[in-house]
Image: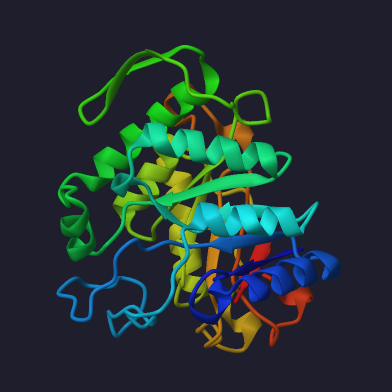
Amino acid sequence: MRIGLHALGIGAGAQPEVIRAVASAAEAVGFARLWVGEHVVMVDRSGSRYPYNEAEEIPVPADADWLDPFVCLSFAAAMTSSIELATGILLLPEHHPVVVAKRAASLDLVSGGRFTLGVGVGWSREEFEALGVPFAQRGARTAEYVAALRELWRHDPASFQGEFVSFDSVRVNPKPVRDGHLPVIVGGNSEPALARVARVADGWYGFNLRDLAEVERCLGSLGGHCHAPWPWSIASPDSWGSSSAPAWASSWWSTLPRRTRTPRQSGCGSWGRGGWGPESPRSEAHPAAREFVTT
């Protein structure tokens, strides 16, 4: 079972000495991956609903330091040599995809091919308004931006014509280390988000799922969207002694195996992630998970 570490770059975790110590220690003890999230803008009073807890409020103070994830992960890459790196997640519709393609491929190069780009559509209307980006159609914008990223990574020169972004015969270098391929994980727990994963992603990033029943719902939905059953069994909540995840539970990421891919479901990949922490023995880890992530 792979174990990942989430939430570097926020609050006290934004200090260089903390990043250096945590990244080095995580690699030394065998963590698989460092995950760094993003918010460009926070507000003191938000009218937007935070979808990942019952309070519907993000549990991070508005005045907390929150590093740019590419900067944070680049610093962590320089402190390490083997631990993998990922954005969990980058709010893709807030950024121009040509710039993201350059930054993501640059990080992949300097880290020796260790980077995975996790993206999501965002939930804060105030954040989008501050950046001058329409909040509406952010899901469609995200899907189109993923397609544009792949064109830029695979072709030189690259051309793309879309509703939200277009470019013609441009060269964006460097390319990702793995033959022009950089894994893109798409986040979200809702049905539209899961359908988006099946259409465009290499993997799924599910965040702060309440219990194993919700995990089962999401995995089953992903299988349905990819027109194939989920290939791993789902443990009964009874095997945990409770239907609820522990209070420290973080998040899951997972996808369908590559054998289920068709030309129309090219986003069904072969990754897996979970989010139970130290109170649960690894032998009872959810069998669908490939990597658990704790904070």
Can residue 202 be seen here?
A: no
Q: Residue at 51%, 15% (x, y): give it.
A: 155
Residue at x 54% of width, y 30% of height: 261
Q: Position of residue 257 (x, y in %)?
A: 62, 40
Q: Quadrant of the N terminus?
A: bottom right
Residue 39 lies, with reference to residue 186, above or below; the image says below
Way the structure is coloured: rainbow
Residue 293, x across and y down, in percent: 62, 69
Is residue 149 placed above or below 67 in the rendered structure? above
Q: Position of residue 51 (x, y in %)?
A: 30, 70
Which residue extends farthest front? 16
Residue 20 visible within the image: yes
Position of the C terminus by quadrant: bottom right
Q: Can you say whether 91 is above or below 1 in the image? A: above
Q: Quadrant of residue 33?
A: bottom right
Q: Nearer the viewer, residue 166 or 278?
A: 166
